[in-house]
Image: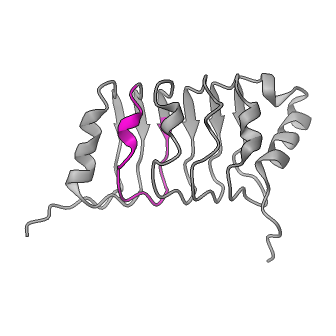
Amino acid sequence: MSVGKPTTCKDALRRWEEENGCEASSAKEINLSFQWPPIEKMDNSLASLSKCEKISLSTNMIEKISCLSSLKNLKVLSLSRNYIKGFTGLEALGDVLEELWISYNCIEKMKGVQVLKNLRILYMSNNQVREWNEFMRLQELLNLRELLFVGNPLYENFE
């Protein structure tokens, strides 16, 4: 079965506006999950969502976090069930993001997570974190209150 061209964020936002009868740029909550064909790339059309407090891009085919620097009010970001490999791209949200839902991705290394100074909730189950020293990076998140980390192949390196 042919999937066709991936859905762009711009097209997904246009579809969301049609379904919800309002401008995405004024919405506090946007759900772009389960797009068909799936979104593969976060693009600059997300910059229009400056009022958004919660956005879901779950269950797509996104490999890299990007284009979030304008989302200065974003408190909850859901990127579960994608192909994301790391935390690069979240730097601009370091002071505002409170919840990150990023389970069922391809994350092996926790590098970059420390920029999320206000993160309270991290749902990160079923990724690829294998090393305890990567897990220990979470101690830098002083506001973290809730963590879901099951399904990661952590092991003790005895060498």
Tag count? 0
Name the spot of residue 64 as percent of width and height, x first: 57, 55
Left or right: where does residue 105 sit relative to residue 8?
left
Q: Residue furthest left?
A: 159
User: Magenta region: which residues?
Assistant: 100-117
On whether residue 101 falls in the magenta region, the answer is yes
At horizontal 33% and vertical 24% (from top left) the residue drawn is 143
Q: Quadrant of the rendered structure where residue 4 is?
A: bottom right
On whether residue 80 falls in the magenta region, the answer is no
- Quadrant where the image shows the C terminus: bottom left
Name the spot of residue 55 as percent of width and height, x first: 65, 35
Left or right: where does residue 60 sit relative to residue 13?
left
Q: Is residue 25 above or below residue 88?
A: above
Q: Is residue 16 above or below residue 132?
A: above
At horizontal 58% and vertical 59% (from top left) the residue drawn is 63
- Is residue 131 or residue 33 the one in the foreground? 131
Name the spot of residue 13 as percent of width and height, x first: 81, 40
At horizontal 42% and vertical 33% (from top left) the residue drawn is 116
